Amino acid sequence: MHQRQLGTVIRAARCAQRMTQAQLGRACGYSASAISRVEAGLLRPAEQPLLLIARALDLPRDAVSVGAPATLARDVIPDQEDAMLRRQLLVAGVAAAGAGVLPSTAIAAGRPDASSRIVGALYSPEASAPTSVRQLRTALALARDQFTASRYQDLGDSLPSLLGTAQATREAVSGRAREEAHACVARAWVLATELALKSHSDIAWPAADRALAAAQASGDPVVQGEAARVLAITMRRAGRPAAAVDLLRRTADALTQTPDDTSRAVATTLLMTAAYTAACGQRRGDALDLMAEAELAVVRLASSGPRPRTQLFTVDATSAQADLYWIGVHTALGTPDEGVPYAARTVPGQLPTAERRARYGTDCARMWHSLGDHRRTFASLRFTEQVAPEEVRRPALRALTADLLYAPVTVAGVRELAARTGVS
């Protein structure tokens, strides 16, 4: 088996097990960077570490063809067999994760799911020519604009090419430029993870893993914080809220040691995400404490004067954003009535992007649904549809629409919304 084939097997199995490179490394006595080299086809482990890798990933012995000595694979040339293996592993990995590439949302709506278009970029990236880091940043900014405008179909179209170009550029440069290219690669994978999370797709796990690996290589603490955030959300979705809170807490603490406001702003967004994650795990005390800490951090940031908004990537650190998180925290804790005052005082126009305004509508819909108010639930869903039409096609919102459609109380307009979003 070629080193690159072996790396593909190990990466696919690791992602299916939802392990990070660091976790796998600890299981076999390797560092995270060594595991990264193994998965890239640059290093073949000796027999004993390879057996430990296979055991940790629940792989049969013959799947990794143990027994070959460690070598650097500088002359590995991908061939048709290698490409076929990647495709087979991808199909097997998606099946093992229990999620199809095209979720029911996309099938019901009669259009492909945007996140499915990044599948190829995970294991068989587009062959792309490198560009300058400056042009790469421009392309990344355009992709970020697509996400914040909730234009997920457009983002799904552009991401494979962006990821291919970003990775080709990273391999073509060195020194400081390479670190900057690593940051661009990380942020492209952050967007890919965000897109997959919107669709509740298991593609989010390997995408978040790629984001964090590139962020760590960049050496930029802000980018590392952004990548840690999406990885933690993925961990929460996988039923590991305690580990996710721990990751967010540790990353936020590290960022607060950096003197610049941008790092502290990202740390604040991590605290808010940690609070909601703790609430999802029914850790009420932790959730309330983390939100109180985040609110205090927001006040301190505001007192330090204005900062460039463009430096933060997908979530901002403002009082309006804190109120938005309070709604979600109280709903998750089973006290949605305590979220109502925050919803009432939030001015959606103060939220900086269509994606965040849609999140306000989504969280209000969940809050009112928990309180049994069908009409206000529908009004919140309609608001979400108005500010971000693609948002209401997400699985979570389609489930809310279905609940309204079959509720004992008839709400005018629900049947039409269900038809527009593919619920009925």
Image (spheres, rainbow, N blue to C red):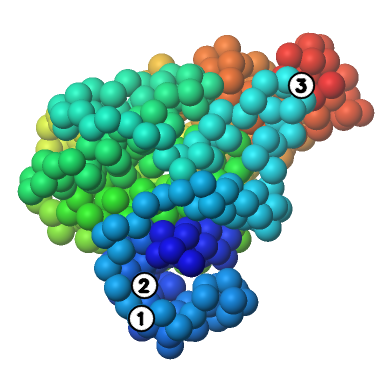
Pick the front one: 411 or 400: 400
Q: Earlier in the sequence, mark 3 or mark 2?
A: 2
Q: Amino acid at mark 2?
A: Arg
Q: Residues within 10 Å of mark 2 (few under 14, many from 20)?
A: many
Q: Which residue is mark 3?
A: 422
Q: Residues within 10 Å of mark 1 (few under 14, many from 20)?
A: few
* Label pair 3/1, CB-CB below 8 angstroms: no
Quadrant in the picture for residue 419: top right
Q: Amino acid at mark 1?
A: Pro
Circle 1 — which element? loop
Pick the front one: 197 or 246: 197
Residue shown at 27% from the left, 38% from the top: 168
Quadrant in the picture for residue 213: bottom left
**Percent x, y of residue 105:** 71, 30
Q: Which residue is mark 1?
A: 69
Q: Is residue 8 above or below residue 63?
A: above
Circle 2 — which element? loop
